[in-house]
Amino acid sequence: MYNQGRYQISFFSLEQLVPQDHLLRKIDQAIDFSFIYDLVQDKYSQATGRPSIDPVVLIKIVLIQYLFGIRSMRQTIKEIETNVAYRWFIGYDFTQPIPHFSTFGKNYVRRFRGTNLFETIFQRILEEAVRHGFVDPEVLFIDSTHVKASANKHKYTKTLIQEQSKKYQAQLEEEINQDRIAHGKKPLPKKHQPVVKEVKTSTTDPDSGLFVKSEKERVFAYSFHTACDRHGFVLGTHVTPAHVHDSQVFDEVLEKVTRRFGLPKAIALDAGYKTPYIAKRCLDANIRPVMPYTRPHTKDGFLHKHEYVYDEYYDCYICPQNEILEYETTTREGYRVYRSNPDKCKDCPLLPRCTESKDVTKRISRHIWAEYVEEAEHLRHTEENKRLYAMRKETIERVFADAKEKHGMRWTTLRGLEKVSMQAMLTFAAMNLKKLATWLWKSGGSKLRYLLLLSKLIQKQRIHVGQLLKQWCLSTL
């Protein structure tokens, strides 16, 4: 009979059933998860209460969910019950019952909520990749992706919220007033009343934000702002509601990475980050900004802004008819405004293509930090910038594509900023772990890994040749 094998009694161990090249075997050899015990030591009582589920088992169960993109913890437990490799990974044989799917949720509420446990696990895996010489933080690739929230887009309330001031607001206001004084204008007084705006807040998940994908499609979502290196290792992430603009979170993402790796040599960004402040922030820190071309927002049939030449020496603009646009004022937003002479404009043959203003006056605005954007624009034409920007599709864009296709990051089944931040950390920790384990498996042993790491250090002149011999001897013990 074809099904007689169902009733065959066999003697075997799980070790014999898991293929030698299975991903979980590679992960088990790549990292020792016993470090988790030290992270949660103060969360468990050794003297009172009944025996708890091993914390390493709990974390491994969650990693299985994110490594293989399983949609929920309930489904993960069902998969572990019947999957030999999953049981082997958590150390449970066929006779041991798998923990209930609610076990992790209860432990999260009672022990892990409000801690940095998941960020520490992410950092520990990243440290292991750094130790083996796989991470190259000299060039950062920063971008964000939207993850749909577990919230009905039709259930919301309209609320008034206070607009969050920019981190660099004080610096901008100071330079605006200095610019106004230099032009003979009075400094602007400080705003006493905060700016308030109306937003749609989800009643299901109030922490999410409304993301407008198109005129017809609007969803509540979160933004995962992320930085990775040239090899696709995620170096840092920061989660915000989807209505927060990418440029507002740039500093937080950069600071998370630089605290561990120091300042990079270059940062590749998309058009959402091409702002005067970010260009200034990069160039002031001696970081090469790699930014794309952005199309002008001029109406069809009108002269483009680049056709009006800025004269830095006389601080004015010159129009295509060689007439001067003189300085008028500096706005609270940091823009100098230059205006033309209406007496000369009214008879100009280019007037229909120049302006539609009723007072027949052309005005051009220029940010007080515009020279930094212009420098970034000049660098855009260099071969180095072209090469680095082309790498975005192989790095940060591939990270997001893999996270959504293979690791279940198209939407979140969790609600609340804290839990969604946990999902981001675990997703990227699983991706880094997968890459680390695969690379170590391919590298073929610890001695070869030592040689790869030491050769890189020698090339960067960070280690003496004598130290090479010493470390080689240690690696052969």
Image: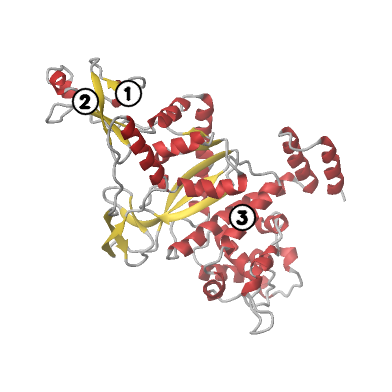
Is 307 placed above or below 429 here? above
Q: Position of residue 168 (x, y in %)?
A: 41, 45
Instruction: Identify the element where label 1 is drawn.
Output: loop
Is 170 placed above or below 114 here? above
Is 197 placed above or below 286 here? below
Quadrant in which the N terminus appears: bottom right
Mark 2 — residue?
301
Mark 3 — residue?
123
Q: Residues within 10 Å of mark 2 (few under 14, many from 20)?
A: few
**Can residue 68 be spotted in the picture?**
no
Q: Position of residue 375 (x, y in %)?
A: 44, 27
**What amino acid is at disc 2?**
Gly
Instruction: Identify the element where label 3 is drawn.
Output: helix
- Asked if residue 464 lies left or right of residue 177, the reply is right
**What amino acid is at disc 3?**
Gln
Q: How many marks?
A: 3
Residue mark closest to the camera, 1 vs 2: 1
Q: Nearer the viewer, residue 351 or 11?
A: 351
Q: Residues within 10 Å of mark 3 (few under 14, many from 20)?
A: some
Q: Nearer the viewer, residue 3 or 245?
A: 245
Q: CA distance from mark 3 to mark 1?
A: 49 Å
**Can residue 460 be spotted in the picture?**
yes
Mark 1 — residue?
315
Q: Nearer the viewer, residue 477 or 278?
A: 278
Q: CA distance from mark 1 to mark 2?
A: 27 Å
Q: Residues within 10 Å of mark 1 (few under 14, many from 20)?
A: few
